[in-house]
Image (spheres, coloured by chain):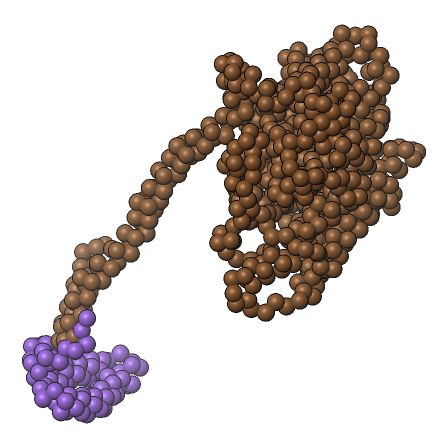
Chain colours: A purple, B brown
Amino acid sequence: MGLTLNHFLVLGALLFCIGLYGALAKRNAIAVLMGIEIMLNAVNITMVGFSFFNHVKPYSTFLTGQIFAIFIITVAAAEAAVALAMIIAIYRRRSTVDVGEIDMMKW
Amino acid sequence: MALYEYSWLILLAPLFAFAVIVFGTRIWDLLSRPRVTAATTHEEAHAVEEHGADGETHAEHDSDVELIEETGPHGERLILENDEDPKVPQLTTGAKVSGYVAIGIMGLACLYSWVILLVSANVPPRQPVDIHLGAISYTWLQQSTASYIIGFHLDNLAIAMMVVVTTVSLLVQFYSQGYMENSAGYARFFAYLSLFAFSMLMIVFAENFLVIFIGWELVGLSSYLLIGFWINKKAKPAEDRLSPASAAIEAFITNRVGDVGFIIGIMILFVNTGTFNFADLAGPASNPLSVAHNFANNQTLLTIAMILVFCGAIGKSAQVPLQVWLPPAMEGPTPVSALIHAATMVAAGVYMVARTFPLFAAAGPAAFGVVAWIGGITALFAATIGLVQSDFKRVLAFSTISQLGYMFVGLGIASPLYGPPFYGPGLGMFHLFTHAFFKALLFLGAGSVLHALHHAMHREVQDMRLMGGLAKYMPVTAITWLIATLSISGFPFFAGFFSKDTIISLAFERNYGLWAITLLTAGFTAFYMLRAYILAFGGKGGAYGGLWGGTYRGTGEPHESPITITLPLILLAIASIFAGYWTPFFSYIQPGAPNLDIPKILIDVFTTPVGALSVIVALAGFVWAYILYTRFELANINAFVQNNPVLRVLHRIVLNKFYVDEFYDLLIRYVVLGISHIEQAFDTYVVDGLVNGTARLVLTMGRDLRHVETGRVQTYMAAIFGGVVVLIALVFVLVNFVK
């Protein structure tokens, strides 16, 4: 009994739920950012898993899932840089990184 | 024939004159005036107002109303407001040229129309003219099978009417040179007169209901502009006179009431036949567009449609029950009254019925019955009121309403359903033809009197109790007015006698009720016309038994009017005598109709009781009026009536026009306005409620739901993922459980 697609999917789903919980429940903006990163990686695992276990010719030779994952990693890096820059800017102005208090753009 | 084909020039001539005045001479007139520097003191401002060549620019007038004290006819002191429009010391060249342009162009049109009339009536082969004027006709709109054509055509009926319109318009415009000599807005007046003539000619030349309706509304517009010409004049409640502005509005709105029926009638005809064209509508049953073809199984609907069309004529020709607008329309300048009463406005209704005569004939007998009886009732009703009026112009207003009633009787009893002789629209049109001349003469003569009295008393006087004995001051006016009086009263050998006597004698053959009414009206007409003549021009102590001169009850010294005023009077007096001697008129209008047999009519007066009676009744009216007003003082007659309880009540009822105006006032105040209030409430609470309610609902929802926007990122994220979960659940349910 080796690794099957189900293992990847369960792992991806678990990681996604953990990330979602972190993004929704944490008050600290950096923790929310971390939750988002976890969700992105959960998706990466799912895609790589799908790609790896695909045996249908000719799609199995295209490595679509892996390439997608690499793109997501790249975008995630850029996203993390921008988001952290924003958090620092907000901290300098408001002296807080509590997402519950950053609610100026309401009704 | 080229002569006829270019007759559209007559139609466009007054419009051209209007355009030249409005876009040319009037602008030149305004530009060429000396510029007035800004006035500083009140005196200077007033001087500018009084002497500026045109009064339309002057502003507040209330502050400097002049008060004139005078002694009234019964010794009471009258305080009169001088609220007239400003007078100009002399007209500018531009204003005069505007008048010359209008008169010159109308003169050419009049000349051309007389040539057409004489050629079509006298030059062989004397075929009835029936020409489509293709030069100015065009298809305005084409919708599948229905075409809306602006079409004009010329036939004998149009020629006869065209001559009346251009002749009376020309004489009225010529006369206006003298009458309006120092009036502000002189050029504007001539522009309106030209527009009025054009509107009427459009009705005359109309080939279909569409064009006649456009002309119809244009006539309404021009009459509105002209009745309200003296916009600054105020109402005179003591004399029971409205302000010209209110009178203009009343005329316009009353006509709207009739026009509702008119347009519904036209629509019924159009929807059922698919054409507006008179010739097609009146065609034989083989023509698929004719009423005979389309209403063969539904004559009742055609009868209703024609009665509705007649509603338009009731409004325009001031018949009962829409006669109320005509007496107040006297507030316009007197030349306008002459034009409205003789040729342009009220004649439109008669002409329209004459034009649609075959359609009325195709409808049931009720259609012509309504025409004849409305006419008969109006004739008697208005003549009764005319008996007691003391306002010079108002007597003439009621006489017009009464004579229009005669014309409708003439049209109604000529219905071919009664059998021969088939006069067609000839009877009514003949009376319209003769009436146009003597009524224009009566009004222009009245204008001459008012003009002279205005110069003598320095204020507007229309009350006959302030006149009397004017014949020795203004002989030309008096003698021409006497001719018109004899003509309208049906005195033998005058034009009115032939046209009126033909109607009365045909009424005797058709219906005794109508005959009695027309006969009685003839007597009343003779009475009040001679009464008006004696009150104005004669009186106790005058020459010829009181017919010429007498005591003058006004102040100052009146003088005969200038030649511009008297010349039209003389020309119209000639026409008032000789218009009745056009004996082939009936066969000219309606081929096959019998000619006017003048010797037979004159012999009938002495040989048959019916012929004699019509003259005897008119003479009785004359004698009665003569005895009353030349043998007794006016004050004594008045005292006698006031002391007799029956006469006093009768006099008051008739003097107040049978309280019709008051009845309409109550009707409008309580019924029409009541319905309006209900409609207003519906509009306010239901229509506006729906609109405002929708807005308020959106507003409330927005105000309450905006709290969803918390501004916190995590709330939005939760909402997005919650939404995704709901969607997934939905897809799952749909895929697995809904087959």
- Could you say where residue B693 lies in the image, as x and y percent from the top left? 27, 52
Is any part of residue B565 visible from this angle? yes
The residue at 74%/24% (across/down) is B542
Q: In this view of the protein, which residue sits in the foreground, A13 or A40?
A: A40
Residue A79 vs residue B645, the one in the foreground: B645
What residue is shown at x 56% (from left), y 68% (from top)?
B38
Q: Is residue A97 above or below residue B587?
A: below
- Residue B429 appears in the picture as rendered: no
The outermost residue toward the right is: B124
In the picture, measured across the screen, residue B490 lies left or right of residue A1, that is right
Where on the picture, by quarter, is residue B161?
top right
Front residue (pair B607, B621)? B621
Q: Residue at x 87, y 44 (%)?
A: B3
Quarter that holds the C terminus of chain B: bottom left
Q: Is residue B252 left or right of residue A78?
A: right
Instruction: Find residue B673 and report its horizontal and vertical position in percent.
Output: 40, 36
Residue A91 horizontal/vertical position (percent): 12, 89
- Name the spot of residue B57 as percent of width and height, x first: 57, 59
Residue B202 sits above or below residue B723 on the image: above
Instruction: Say left or right for B165 vs B55.
Output: right
For this rendering, which residue is in front, B368 or B602?
B602
Q: Residue at left 61%, top 29%?
A: B465
Q: Quadrant of residue B251?
A: top right
> For the N terminus of chain B, which image quadrant?
top right
Q: Is residue A92 left or right of residue B613?
A: left
- The quadrant where residue B337 appears: top right
How many discs mark residues in the rendered view?
0
